[in-house]
Image (spheres, rainbow, N blue to C red):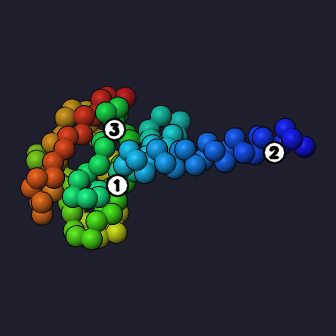
Amino acid sequence: MATRHVSFSLVRIALVLAGLATGLLGYSAIAAAQNGARQIVIKMANMSYGRIPTDLKVGDTITWVNGDSVPHSVTARDKSFDLRLQPKQSAKLTLSKAGTIQIICIYHPTMRGALKVAAR
């Protein structure tokens, strides 16, 4: 009986820590299908894109979540994509090419970042 209780407690602790890490880092990555592509969530908050993973690969899908009370965009400087999100909205972007993509929020030009995407 004590072993079962300890195992359950460890699972609960692991889930709580995973949730905290996601909230603190501003993104979460979930392993996906056979090709190794991942589903990644990046939360925009406090007028920032949050932490962008450094190990992005072609085929990964990013879900951008606007956690602020104002609109934001995720706009590629090379004009390859332009996602516009109202407060509390989300949008998905599947990475289709390798390279570094500079991004900016068209509403808040100080919000900038880069997606460094490696080939799979």
- Secondary element under disc 2, as helix, strand or loop, is helix
97 or 38, which lies in front? Answer: 38
Give the Cα separation between the discs numbered 2 and 1: 35 Å
Inspect the image, locate mark 3, and give the three-letter code of the amino acid beneath it.
Pro
Q: Secondary structure at mark 3?
A: loop
Q: Amino acid at mark 1?
A: Lys
Question: In whole angstroms, how far apart are the C-alphas of marks 3 and 2?
Answer: 36 Å
Asked if marks 3 and 2 touch (Cβ < 8 Å), the reply is no
Could you say where residue 75 lies in the image, as x and y percent from the top left?
17, 54
Is the C terminus in the top left, top right, bottom left or bottom right quadrant?
top left
Q: Residue furthest top?
A: 119
Residue at 51%, 40% in the rendered image: 31
Residue carrying label 1? 43
Q: How busy is the neighbourhood of tag 2: few (under 14 within 10 Å), some, or many (20 plus)? A: few
User: Label 2 sits on what residue type?
Assistant: His
Looking at this view, is 44 or 37 the one in front? 44
Disc ID at residue 101:
none
Image height of 114 relative to 119, above or below: below
Frontmost residue, 5 versus 58: 5
Q: Quadrant of the N terminus?
A: top right
Going from N to C along the chain, the mark reached first, 2 or 1, is 2
Q: Which of the pair 69/28 is nearer the observer?
A: 69
Report whether residue 91 is seen. no
- Of the two numbered discs 3 and 1 on the same chain, state the one appearing first in sequence: 1
Left or right of 90 on screen, residue 112 = left
Disc nearer the start of the sequence (3/2): 2
| Residue, disc 3 | 53
The image position of residue 66, as x and y in percent, is: 31, 62
Marks 3, 2: nearer the viewer: 2
Q: Which residue is mark 2?
A: 5
Q: Residues within 10 Å of mark 3 (few under 14, many from 20)?
A: some
